[in-house]
Image: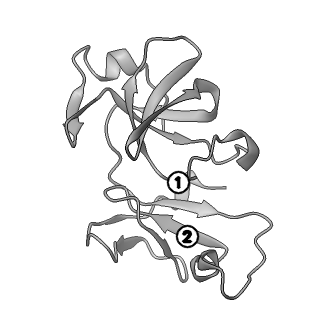
Amino acid sequence: MAIVNVAQAAGGGGAPGVAGIKVRAWARVWQATRPEHSKGLRHGAWYPVVRDERADRVTIQVGEREVDVPRRILEITGSRPSRFTVVHRLGFVPSRGNDRYRLGRHYGVCPKCQWRFGIIGRPVQEKCPKCEFQGDIAWWETV
């Protein structure tokens, strides 16, 4: 996936809003970003970019709040992705009773609703168990 200039990708006027928010682009944390540097953002989840006025940072919408994030830790694209992201958890140690246990060593993230779900095998397509969005799984984006 290419990184695009947010202002160019949005054509200056921005993309359609998400729940009334004017979205300028979409961003997710680079897979290689260490958790202590990711500002609490979920790996694999795409967040709407709501402001892009500074050279080194963008503002993304995270739930009900806006968060300024260093541009260097984000992958930014002009339109909302239509494929499932695969997140590989390095150093994953299963622990029963932990909600993260059910997701396994790698899991998918729905591009529409951000729901996380365990992936068994290496399917090419998936249907989100929460919102029923169906699409390709982007194995090619992962290491």
In this picture, residue 85 sits left or right of residue 135: right
| Picture layout, residue 129 above or below residue 5 | below
Q: Residues within 10 Å of mark 1 (few under 14, many from 20)?
A: many
Q: How is the image coloured?
A: one colour
Q: Residue at x 42, y 60 (%)?
A: 84
The residue to which callout 2 is attached is 107
Label 1 sits on what residue type?
Answer: Gly
Q: Residue furthest bottom?
A: 96
| Picture layout, residue 8 above or below residue 33 | above
Q: Residue at x 80, y 67 (%)?
A: 91
The residue to which callout 1 is attached is 44
Q: Secondary structure at mark 1?
A: loop
Instruction: Write down the quadrant of residue 51 in the picture.
Output: top left
Label 2 sits on what residue type?
Answer: Tyr
Q: Residues within 10 Å of mark 2 (few under 14, many from 20)?
A: many
Q: Residue at x 43, y 46 (%)?
A: 46
Q: Marks 1 and 2: in contact by CB < 8 Å?
A: yes
